[in-house]
Each structure stands twice: as structure tokens, then as C-alpha cells.
């Protein structure tokens, strides 16, 4: 066999070994002890309603609900 064939074969083997190590080192690690309750969106929750340009006459509902009356204490 000529030295060119041997060099190409060794380069191919080195390439396969290199790709194997890169693939095994970069794959995502799964931590079995981690709690997976998060929904994955990250960041801070913003619970305010979106700012939408509503048509005339349409308004966002408010949280102004009537408060229950406090019971009165009667002294005899």
C-alpha cells in the first residue's frame, strides 16, 4: 500500500475519533436529582394585562369589587 492510502486511512480514523469525543463531550447532561417543576420560560412573571389598543367604548375590567361590610359590635 502506498503511503498516501495509509495517510488517508489514519486521517479518517482520527476524524472519526475526534467526532466521537466532540459528540460525547457536548451532549446535554441530564441531572437526575434536579426538580423539573419549572415550565422553562425563564425570566420574571409579568401579570399585568397587555397594553392593547381597545376599540372605543371597550375598557379593561377593574378589580374594584365591593368590599364586604364589617360586622358592627353592639354593646348592651
Image: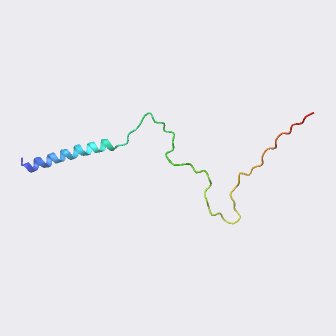
Residue at position x 48%, y 36% from top? 35
Q: How many marks?
A: 0
| Residue extending furthest toward the bottom | 56
Asked whether, in this view, residue 46 is left or right of residue 72, the answer is: left
Camera-side residue of 10 and 66: 66
Position of the C terminus by quadrant: top right
Task: Give residue 38's position: percent from left, percent from top.
Answer: 51, 42
| Residue extending furthest toward the right | 76
Asked whether, in this view, residue 57 is left or right of residue 50, the answer is: right
Residue at position x 18%, y 44% from top? 13
Asked whether, in this view, residue 42 is left or right of residue 67, the answer is: left
In which image quadrant can residue 60 be found?
bottom right
Asked whether, in this view, residue 69 is left or right of residue 17, the answer is: right
Q: Give above or below for 52 relative to 63.
A: below
User: What's the image's color scheme?
Assistant: rainbow
Q: Give above or below for 75 relative to 1.
A: above
Task: Give residue 72's position: percent from left, percent from top.
Answer: 86, 39
Task: Give residue 42's position: percent from left, percent from top.
Answer: 50, 47
Camera-side residue of 71 and 7: 71
Residue at position x 74%, y 51% from top? 64
Task: Give residue 26's position: percent from left, percent from top.
Answer: 33, 44
| Residue extending furthest toward the front | 75
Residue at position x 63%, y 64% from top? 53
Amino acid at each position: 500500500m502506498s503511503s498516501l492510502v495509509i495517510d488517508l486511512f489514519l486521517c479518517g480514523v482520527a476524524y472519526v475519533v475526534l467526532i466521537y469525543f466532540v459528540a460525547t463531550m457536548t451532549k446535554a447532561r441530564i441531572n437526575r436529582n434536579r426538580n423539573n417543576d419549572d415550565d422553562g420560560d425563564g425570566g420574571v412573571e409579568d401579570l399585568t394585562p397587555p397594553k392593547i389598543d381597545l376599540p372605543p367604548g371597550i375598557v379593561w375590567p377593574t378589580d374594584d369589587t365591593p368590599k364586604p361590610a364589617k360586622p358592627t359590635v353592639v354593646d348592651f
